[in-house]
Image (spheres, coloured by chain):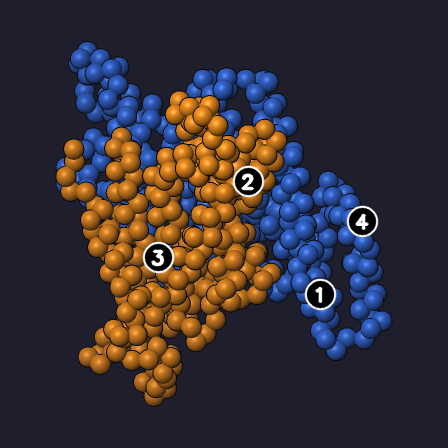
Chain colours: A blue, B orange
Amino acid sequence: MGRYLLRRLLLLLPVMWGVSTLVFLLIHLTPGDPVEVMLGEAALPAAREALRQSLRLDRPLPEQYLFFLHGLVTGDLGTSLFSREPVFARLLQALPATAELAVTGLGVALMIAVPLGTVAAVRRGSGLDHGSRFVALLGVSVPNFVLAPLLILAFAIELNWLPVSGRGGLGHLVLPALTLGMAFAGILSRMVRASLLEVLGQDYIRAARAKGLSERRVILRHGLMASVIPVITIVGLQFGALLSGAIITETIFAWPGLGRLTLQAIQARDYPLVQGCVLVISFGYVLVNTATDLLYAYVDPRIRYE
Amino acid sequence: MRKNRPWPSGLLLVTGVMLCALLAPILAPHSPTEQVLAEGLTGPSLTHPFGQDRLGRDLLSRTLYGARISFWVATVAVSISLGIGLVVGAAAGHFGGWVDELVMRFVDILQAFPGILLAIAFAAILGPSITNVVIALSLIGWVGYARLTRGQILVVREMEFVTAVRALGGKDLRVILRHLLPNIVGPVLVEASFGFASVIVAEASLSFLGLGTQPPTPSWGAMLDEARQYLLVAPHLTLFPGLAIVVTVMGLNFLGDGLRDLWDPRGG
């Protein structure tokens, strides 16, 4: 396990380097002049030149790239063109809000998906199975920008139970987390169903039944526990989708996280901030994927030897 | 064998929406861009079954024309992605070695970005327009097809009939086109039908964020974005375009599920 762990962690380096380089190129080869965006077209040539120098935009691209890599390693991602704050600090401000939303969304998804998928697998072929599969498919098919306004309409406007937007107490978290969790629940419950069906067909399940265990115990203790592995993978692989879902969800609910910050930065053409946001989200994505692989290898030792 | 398969209803839904897209000019009771300002935000009525938007435009007509935009974007973007993905994936899988290594590392890096984030970045860089949405979605879409094609080719390549063709002196291009690709059509088709659904959602997302189609073009995403301000007074503006997307995506997912069952009866 030690060697595998080391190998996977070392493999992170080239991928992250590639990701940062791509982000750098994406931002720096973009047509449009950040200086013009900041100062407007009417600015004096001298002012432009000064700003260009302070942003090092007058240097050749390779030099800018080296400077960028150096900043990356030392945690200096430049300053936001508009708020003039360090990009790193802005990202740190936004990160907890997104983490809070993502984790709660994941929790909502699991709370819906595990019972739904289990019932579907245990009562395979029944009306209950078809019903729960339909609900799962509905979850996958309703995009978050359709679901969110409907939830707001029902729970915030008509019933007036929950706030429309913003971040604050637990009440603020409910609708965004539901929005984020529903699509995820759809995918997950299909996975739980398929995985559990496969496990329930195994000999040791028949053995557990034969020795007289209650059906409830067979399913919860022997079935669900064993079907957890593929579910972990899907949770990990879909975490990136959850993060991208956060861009729209956060925007709709005015949730002050990374997703909304990214969109605002893009709309304001705040290049250093865009660069920082895209980097953090991609790094998070890569890290979660690697963590998933490691967890998977830990739970199922056969994987390491491939 | 299970009865009660969902794919016929999927096919029905998709065909229905596709007909709406094709026949929008005939089916639409009004022009999708004609404004009747005095009737702004009016709810559903006999002459306007889906109601009217802020500028008094007929929502039914706009929703029908919206299907056209969605299907146009999805058809073009999926075709381009599929084309690139097949060529790149087949080359990587067939030749192996450094070609494979190079291609797959690049694919790894592109897949290290959440898709929609990359699409947003491309769309923002290229500027908001429907053509740029197609370009952005194609640029990120091919990666999945390339990976799938490569994986499938690696399996088929080892089969005996391919060795036989090679022994008979089959050239690379001929082996790929005549013997490898036809054997991987199934999984690729399944992937493409899900891909179609995700492109429709992605286009709507970009338009919703203001980075896609621009007014007055009736795109479902843009219509939903506009509807947000009037959620309280005119919920029909959210309801109908939202329903259109859900029905379309659901139909495509049903269809993809069905195709997958056909190809791999163990799944599902």
Badge 3 crowding class, 10 Å Cα cut-off, few under 14, some 14 to 19, many 20 or more, is many
Of badges 1 and 3, the one in the foreground is 1
Q: Looking at the image, is mark 2 or mark 4 nearer the viewer?
A: 2
Name the front one of labels 2 and 3: 2
Secondary structure found at label 1: loop
How far apart, in angstroms, are the residues tagged by discs 4 and 1?
18 Å
Q: Residue at 40% across / 57% down in the picture? A: B74
Looking at the picture, how far across and down is residue A301, in whole percent?
Answer: 46, 17
Binning the other alpha carbons within 10 Å of mark 1 as few (below 14), some (14 to 19) or many (20 upward) gives few
| Mark 1 or mark 2, whichever is nearer to me | 2
Q: Circle 4 sits on which residue?
A: A63
State the image coordinates of residue B178 (x, y, percent, origin top left).
41, 37
Seen in the image, is A263 located left or right of residue A55? Answer: left
Q: Position of residue A300 (x, y in %)?
A: 43, 20
Residue drawn 48% across the image and 28% down it = B169
Q: Chain of mark 2?
A: B
Identify the residue under disc 1: A33
Q: CA distance from mark 4 to mark 3?
A: 47 Å
User: In the drawing, what numbered circle is on residue A147?
Assistant: 3
